[in-house]
Amino acid sequence: MIVILITSFLLLEALPLLQQVGWLRFVRDQAWHPVQGRYNLMPMVWGTLLVTLGSVLLATPLGIGSAIFCQYYAPPC
């Protein structure tokens, strides 16, 4: 419920700018310079996705290795 409220608040606050600029220009403009009226969201989206992928690739083997160690090799407490 909180995520829905946060998302709706952000969309309501950004709606005037998105109506003025347009969705396509907001995502595909040349660069991110809001003062100059240029918006490009895609580098930030790609950066977020790549950081998330890197963290999953790093955390998955560590988590599985920790679970195997705790189940089979760690002494009982």
Image (cartoon, rainbow, N blue to C red):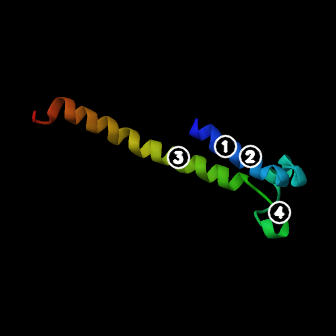
Q: Residues within 10 Å of mark 2 (few under 14, many from 20)?
A: few
Mark 2–mark 1 contact, CB under 8 Å?
A: yes
* Label 2 secondary element: helix
- Marks 2 and 4: which is nearer the front? 2
Q: Residues within 10 Å of mark 3 (few under 14, many from 20)?
A: few
Q: Residues within 10 Å of mark 1 (few under 14, many from 20)?
A: few
Q: In the rendered image, which residue does mark 2 sit on?
A: 11
Q: CA distance from mark 3 to mark 1?
A: 20 Å
Q: In the rendered image, which residue does mark 1 sit on?
A: 7
Q: Position of residue 72 (x, y in %)?
A: 17, 29
Q: Give above or below for 74 relative to 30.
A: above
Task: Tell me the kind of residue under disc 4.
Answer: Arg
Residue at 64%, 41% in the rendered image: 5
Q: CA distance from mark 2 to mark 1?
A: 6 Å
Query: Which of marks 1 and 3 precedes in the sequence?
Result: 1
Q: In the rendered image, which residue does mark 3 sit on?
A: 52
